[in-house]
Amino acid sequence: MEKKYLGQRVIRNEDPRILTGRGKYMADITYHNMLHAAFLRSDYPHAKLNSVDISAALEIPGVIAIYTAEDLGDYWHPGPVLVPAPHSIPGITANSRTQIPIVKDIIHHQGEVLAMVVAENRYIAEDALASIYVDSDPLDAVENVEAALKPGSPLVHEELGTNIATYVRQERGNFAECKTKADHVIHQKFIMDRGSAGAMENRGFCANWDEDAQQLTIHCNTQSPSGLRNSMAAWFGIPEQRVRVVVPFVGGGFGPKVMTNQPEEVLCTFASIKLHRPVKWLEDRAENFIGTTAERVQVHDCEIAFNKDGKVLGVRDSFLYDTGAFNPYTATIPLNTQTHTTGMYDIPVFLTEFTSVFTNKMICSPVRGAGRTYGVFVMERMLDMVARKLNVDPAKVREINLIAAEAKFPLETGIIAQDFAQFVLDSGNYPAVLKKAREMIGYEDFKKNQQPKFRAEGRYVGIGLVLFTENTGVGPYEGTKITVGNSGKVFASSIYGTQGQGHFTVFAQIVADQIGCKVEDVIIETGDTDKFAWGTGTFASRGATVLGNAYHHTATLVRAKILATASRLFNVPESELELGDGMVKVADMPDKFIKLGDLATKANPMRGTIKPGTEPGLEATGFYAPPYGATAYGAAAAIMEIDPLSFNIKFHKFIFVDDCGTVINPMILDGQLHGGIQMGVGNAYFEKLVYDENAQLLNGSLMDYLIPRATDMPTKMEIGHLNTPSPLNPLGIKGVGESGTIPIPPLYCQAIEDAFNLPDLFITEVPLSPSIVYSLVEEAKAKK
Amino acid sequence: MSDLIDIKVNVNGQLYERSVEPRMLLSDFIRFELGLGGTHVGCEHGVCGTCTILFDGKPQRSCITFAVLADGHTIETVESLGTPEKMSTLQQAFQEKHGAQCGFCTPGILMTMTAFLKENPHPSEEEIREGIDGNLCRCTGYQNIIEAVKLAAENMDSKS
Amino acid sequence: MEIKGDYTFNGPRPVVWSVLRDVNILATAIPGETTLKPISATEYEGSIKLKIGPVSGVFAGKLTVADEVVPESCTLIIEGKGGAGFAKGTGYIKLTEQPDNKTLMQYTGELGIGGKLASVGQRMIDSVAKSMIKGGLEKLEKEVAQRL
């Protein structure tokens, strides 16, 4: 089987539509009789709702309906748990509270929906919001996770009697015992905050209930079309076969768009069913900051036990996780933290426990990186502490503790992962990634030759090098249907959501290799539940791995049908047939060939018979399910200079090494890493959702919440690759979507410390900012 | 609701006469009155640059411009640059260098860069970086956008 | 947000006090279309139209005067809410007699805000508050001058 496209730099099939403004996004979805929705959201993070007076708003011409909680009747109830608790772990505490579509009595966070206006246009709908009078009494709010656990703290859910949502403890070995045997034990607290997903396109939803056909059609920029279909079917008692979800082009996902049963989804659907008209809502940016889920703070209390030779014996990490006002996603984020903390290091003993805490803030749900970032942050910082304590080079400490290249993969870690199975490292060569990173950044040369010169000149130039793993491509499964059409075009559909990852191209490459056609002749159809009904969704960097292998498997089935059909047609054995250039050829007989489209026509005769026991057409459906996730890994390194006046950062060099197994398309792969790195830069130096002590968001606009701009980024991100194929799937793929994001915050910390070279400058909290680094440096100088 | 105001606007070479509310945003006018969906709206407060159009040849945020202010003026949107079958040199360079991922911010970046390259046909990499600093992109880390603009400048050069 | 400052009026303390405690004058000292009407000797209800950066709206609220020591000091408690958010503040005002028939006013206060006002308008609040106080004090000064 020739691999004409797999691994090649193929330009994207979708680009001509996207680049000319012809691609349709949510804002472009329209019906002639469509109505527009707007939501009145709570200003208070915690309050008792007394009444909502809509009478004045209803008088406004063009307002069609206004709904409050009472109007929903039996449709008012809390949503389902989207991801259950990891009940396979003994001794867990799991208190579940899920989101409600519209507030009835208690407001739990700022931005919660209090009323919905449906109007002839968006302008009128927003006018009406300003005329609704809300009577509510504010209650004391819970903002800080540590304060939330103190006696006497206000409670987010009074009836629970606690703000603890989930508690999970996992231990490999015995940390208490390990501590007594170590030469050194260091104890340190770390705080890491993360922010908004900040997709350039906000959320959008359009519901159209067709009373006559008893069919609900939804357009939404969801990451999980199947999840959305099933959830709306269940909520409104419609068979899921009568719910069609269609996803247009999506302007970025990065996590929150995977959430289903969101208030706006329930309410738009409700309104469409009530009014028998399409109802559409487009979120604006101000709403996105308070109405869309985000990721947020974890507070870690850590200990690391190590010997004087630098070998780490054990790590303890006890952390608090801010889950927000509700926890429908339960523990995916902190479980990811637990599974990524010890990463690619050989650390025999590991005690990890977390307490997920309710606060009066928007729900926390995975954002690109999804919990892995926190684990990598605390581990990399702890290794830097070991390096300082022993006065050893940080890269050397990492080298000492890496899992050996000769280790017998797969390696069990004893820690349960987000898919509730034990986290297993499937394959890898970790020393090789460190070696490559050191070479690419010029580690030794910088330390030995360049840095002394910079220091002599009084310039603050530092180097950082950190390592990470990324568990990707978890189950349960994905599936596809591939059809060779009479036109010769190959239609390959799945239910998967796509948000700019190049799916229209990378999956076409995989299919084209099997079918023997041009990559541009493979039409990838995604996110329409009527085109293909089976699958789960875009999360956990699983597209290339899980769906990629499903496309590969299904394409082999179609290939077999092509060969069998052509074999019958030409009356030659399959072994003498060749596929390529969009046709089937008989080997060594140049005049015996048939175009794929013509073969498809012959395989679906309109009269006569087909061979009993065979199926018509050149079409197959297939699935792929991984046993567990494949683990990608890599390194990030940078030489950065900090301006002593502005504390802005200029990169002298930035490199990233990644091993995601088999590469489908290096151009798209590098693009995924570039974007991931950008989000990591935001997490390190720019992005933080700031709340006051009453859980009131203080920076809910792109003026104050800073997404990295072009001049904030390294001028050149040099990407290096290793290719250790995953043994878990036929194509050997591991995911990459979140890799770029994961290691950047600890990289900044290490390099900034190295630049200033002050004994008392050790960074324990991110995100940083120019003013924070300025203060830390001044404090450290004062201690000197 | 307020009275409607009659405006005449030249958009992509075609003259449109419409009656609009004074508060209608130019972005909404382009998208919903004229049906030109290529102009996307990302923040509605003038920060992200997604909605950038050319207003008498100069880049402008259409989300913080009222449609009535465009009366008697010339607007260019992404639809004026090329078609899927025949993309402009800049658009081709974006495809060649993978300068777009989700494509949502892209129209704004293409319009900003179209004006930029007219003013500065031989930009340095640093000038390009500063030129797109007012446009947010969440997918690409900007590197391939800058590569694409560089390539477009080269290709425009060799064509002329 | 904390508010703190002082201002010297060109007038004796009793006049300054009478101006401060005149609800009609106070209403005009606040920029925008402000209405205030008494509901008791120390409580007032009304509305204020505010614009802070991109956020504007009408806030309905209540002003309470407490701990009044005539003509020396009092505490002002303000609570307001509207379409663009809510505000809650406490201010303490103290008047001290100065030579030449002048009066020093010292004020300290705490203002808590929420909703869109806080999340979107945050960056402008400090400067808007300062300019409102400045404008208000100038109005009060004029009124003091007229009553002399």
Image (tube, rainbow, N blue to C red):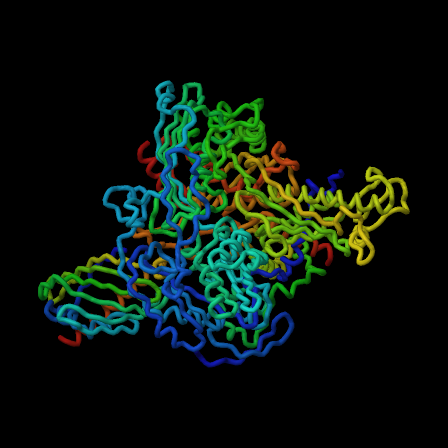
**Residue C26 to residue A437: above or below:** below
**Residue C109 to residue A376: above or below:** below
Residue A687 in view in this figure: no
Q: Nearer the viewer, residue A672 or A548?
A: A548
Q: Left or right: where does residue A441 sit relative to residue A360?
A: right
**Residue A118 x, y percent position in the rendering:** 45, 69
**Residue A758 to residue B145: above or below:** above
**Residue A260 x, y percent position in the rendering:** 48, 53
- Residue at image location 67% in from the left, 41% down from the top: A553
Q: Left or right: where does residue B149 sit relative to residue A176?
A: right
- Furthest-left residue in this view: C70
Assign the C terminus of chain A to one quadrant of the image. top left
Q: Left or right: where does residue A182 sit relative to residue A25?
A: left
Q: Nearer the viewer, residue C147 or B17?
A: B17
Residue A667 in view in this figure: yes
- Residue at image location 59% in from the left, 63% down from the top: B38
**Residue A32 x, y percent position in the rendering:** 56, 72
Assign the N terminus of chain A to one quadrant of the image. top right
**Residue A708 to residue A173: above or below:** below
Number of labelled discs? 0
- Residue at image location 27% in from the left, 73% down from the top: C34
Q: Left or right: where does residue A609 sit relative to residue A368?
A: right
**Residue B111 x, y percent position in the rendering:** 59, 61
